Amino acid sequence: MTTVFDPVDLSGTQLSNRIALAPMTRSRAGAGGTATDLTTDYYTQRASAGLLITEGIQPSAVGQGYPATPGLHSAEQVASWRKVTDSVHAAGGRIFAQIMHAGRIGHPVLLPDGLTPVAPSPVTAPGQLYTQDGPKDFVEPHELTDAEIRATIGDFVSASRNAIEAGFDGVELHGANGYLIHQFLAPNTNLRTDEWGGSEEARLRFAVEVVKAVAAEIGAGRTALRISPGNPYNGIEEPEPDALYTALVAELEPLGLAYLHLLEQIDIRELTLALRKRYTGTLVINVFSGGPTGPGHHTVIDDGVADLISYGALFLANPDLPARLRSGGPFNTPDPSTFFGGGAKGYTDYPVLDAV
């Protein structure tokens, strides 16, 4: 029986175990959206994971959705991430960059002068966004033209190429949690009637075109996609996700991607199993069933539901999580007050197992 501690071949990238660090926004980037020494410390501390997946990294200036998030669209940003990847590799780890375009989730105060958030359709997200100027209502996004859509695909490609130049082992394209790719997939945020929207087939097109373009640039074995069927985060409404995501998986199946990363919402295990049956490549699962992925959830590997499991908050509080899972604990309790903000050490201060 395969267990979470067994090695796995990720399309040529050898992983020491099947435990992944989930991608989590940290809002601790340096000047110009660069990675910092804290970034290096954070990922290197967690290099005992089979796979590290970074926080969301914007592929362009307009793709930024939160304060102090990093990019991969300038030479300075690429150089800053090289320090991170070199340190992780020296510690024996493997690391993928998550490329995240926030789409309508953002605000003009975060962006260079004259830019406004973009989306498939001019549908304003509900609620507010925390910014350096305090909470702000979301604004109506600019509806991307056909030419702008194609240019945005190019931004994903360019950022992915930059990620490989920065030393990453691959990229994970963020198609979940209500950000741009997800906005094209969802019927309430994609109201288009052209080739990029309307039918389910058309709503899939942007996600598929981004994946194919990136895979053509850096290789399918270094390209992955994250999805979250039925996830209502950021105002997404997908009341009947099964058919859409089954069709998406059918499009991805022949590409030979590094992996498909599924954020599993509560009560959709039936869909997970259906997607697993149709997708023969490597499947990573993040079990978000009434709360973050916990110590006992790694049985999804034993049961054959997935090939890897990603941990979020539990990995923040336990930098040596693989060792703690193997020993059955003890587990540090996550402290949400340390999760974000302005360069505070926070999540690098948790004790490791030999200090407990």
Image (cartoon, rainbow, N blue to C red):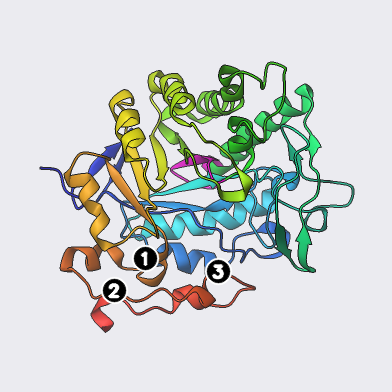
Q: Amino acid at mark 2?
A: Phe
Tell me the mark number nearer the camera, choosing from 1 and 3: 1
Query: What residue is drawn where x is 60% and y is 57%?
Result: 80
Where residue 166 appears, as percent x and y from the top left, is 54, 47
**Figure check: 227 above or below 208:** below
Which span is picked out in magenta? 164-177
Where residue 49 appears, as percent x and y from the top left, is 32, 56
Tell me the mark number nearer the camera, choosing from 2 and 3: 2
Residue toward you, 73 or 196: 196
Q: Amino acid at mark 1?
A: Leu
Mark 1 = which residue?
A: 314
**Residue 148 in the figure: left or right of residue 298:** right
Q: Amino acid at mark 3?
A: Asp
Alpha carbon separation for disc pair 2 and 3: 26 Å
Residue toward you, 11 or 128: 128
> For the C terminus, which image quadrant?
bottom left
**Residue 254 in the figure: left or right of residue 211:** left
Query: What residue is drawn where x is 39% and y is 78%?
Result: 350
Q: Residues within 10 Å of mark 2 (few under 14, many from 20)?
A: some
Furthest residue toward right: 114
Mark 2 = which residue?
A: 331
Residue 37 - label: 3
